[in-house]
Amino acid sequence: MYGTTDIAQRTLALSRTFDAPAALVFAAWSEPKHLVRWWGPKDFTLPHCEQDFRVGGRYRFCMRAPDGSDHWVRGEYTLIDPPHRLVFTWLREEGDDVWCDTVVALTFVEEEGRTRMTLHQTTFATSAHCDVHRDGWTECFDRLEHFVETLNT
């Protein structure tokens, strides 16, 4: 049985402040034409971006690493409250296996034209999986930060 401490170690929480309004940061998550410009860790591309952005809608993305390997993720949108909150399931595929089955919850809080975005992703099977996603999301948010800045100028 997992204890409370173990669950905390298998839950990811990240925040980032963007120099852009919440509506703009939220919109970056809502359309494939935006996602392909920033989604994924550093130097990854998004050659497949299928998205039905509505509650109950599904998405499926292929993140291509610099070495050419493909990393697939899919899920379903369970809550969409523009520009305040976005929640979706996250299933990471490796071949015929799903090795990461979690829920991602994003909140967007605007203050004086800047947006504080907070991500919670839970509950990972292992703390190692949580660490891998922390690194990936951090690089992804770096790219998102650059993307929204270019749109906001």
Image: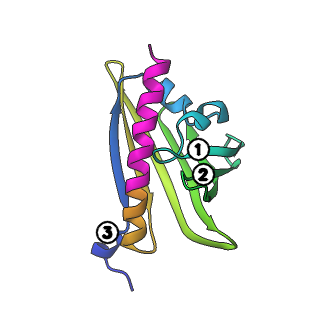
- In the image, residue 135 sits, relative to residue 131, either above or below, namely above
> Split into 4 quadrants, where in the image is the C terminus?
top left
Q: Residues within 10 Å of mark 3 (few under 14, many from 20)?
A: some
Q: What element carries label 2?
A: strand
Single out the residue that lies furthest toward the bottom: 1
- Total marks shown come to 3
Report the Cα–Cα distance between label 1 and label 3. 29 Å
Q: Name the residue under label 3.
A: 9
Report the Cα–Cα distance between label 2 and label 3. 28 Å
Amino acid type assigned to the residue bearing label 1 in the image: Thr
Q: How crowded is mark 2: few (under 14 residues within 10 Å), some or many (20 or more)?
A: some
Side (left or right) of 93 relative to 7:
right
Is the magenta region chiefly helix, strand or loop? helix
- Please state the extent of the stretch shown in magenta in the rendering: 135-153
> Split into 4 quadrants, where in the image is the N terminus?
bottom left
Residue 17 image position (x, y, % from top left) = 33, 33
Residue 39 image position (x, y, % from top left) = 54, 42
Q: Is mark 3 on a helix, strand or loop?
A: helix
Q: Which of marks 1 and 3 is in front?
A: 1
Amino acid type assigned to the residue bearing label 2 in the image: Arg
Q: Is residue 5 located in the magenta-colored stretch of the structure? A: no
Q: Mark 1 points at which residue?
A: 45
Single out the residue that lies furthest toward the left: 5
Disc 2 to disc 1: CB gap under 8 Å: yes
Q: Earlier in the sequence, mark 2 or mark 3?
A: 3
Quarter of image, res 133: bottom left
Amino acid type assigned to the residue bearing label 3 in the image: Gln
Q: Mark 2 points at which residue?
A: 64
Q: Earlier in the sequence, mark 1 or mark 3?
A: 3
Quarter of image, res 146: top left
